[in-house]
Image (spheres, grey):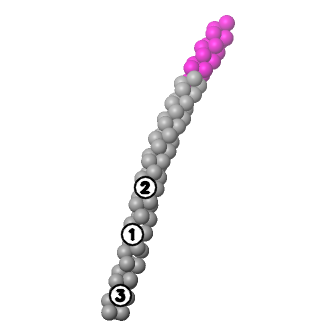
Amino acid sequence: MVSGELLTKQFEEIEVKVERLVEICKSLEAINFKLKNKIELLEKELQNKTDIEIAYEEERKLIRTKIDRLLARLEDIEEQK
């Protein structure tokens, strides 16, 4: 009978440990889900900032081109005098 009680006790200990592991697993899954959402949000923010930077560079090039054209026109006007 003693070995039966020992076996029962060992199964109960195993059951408690398995329950703890299941709880840890669920907790880690919840953390993982939150982290994945955070990564997705950060990737969207990064893409948005990248798009803004690209648009800024394009606008800067356009302005530089317009300035160069205006300077060329001024030079032409000056040469005609």
Q: Which of marks 2 and 1 is nearer the N terminus?
A: 1
Mark 1 element type? helix
User: In terms of depth relative to the viewer, which is nearer, 53 or 70?
Assistant: 53
Q: Distance between the residues labelled 2 and 1?
A: 17 Å
From the image, tell me which residue sits under label 1.
Answer: 19
In the image, which residues are magenta? 65-81
Q: Is residue 73 magenta?
A: yes
From the image, tell me which residue sits under label 2.
Answer: 30
What residue is rendered at 38% in x and 72% in y? 18
Pointer 2 and pointer 1: residues touching (CB < 8 Å)?
Answer: no
Q: Position of residue 1 (x, y in %)?
A: 32, 92
Mark 3 element type? helix
Picture quarter containing residue 68?
top right
Can residue 67 be seen at all in this image of the molecule?
yes
From the image, tell me which residue sits under label 3.
Answer: 5
What residue is rendered at 46% in x and 41% in y? 44
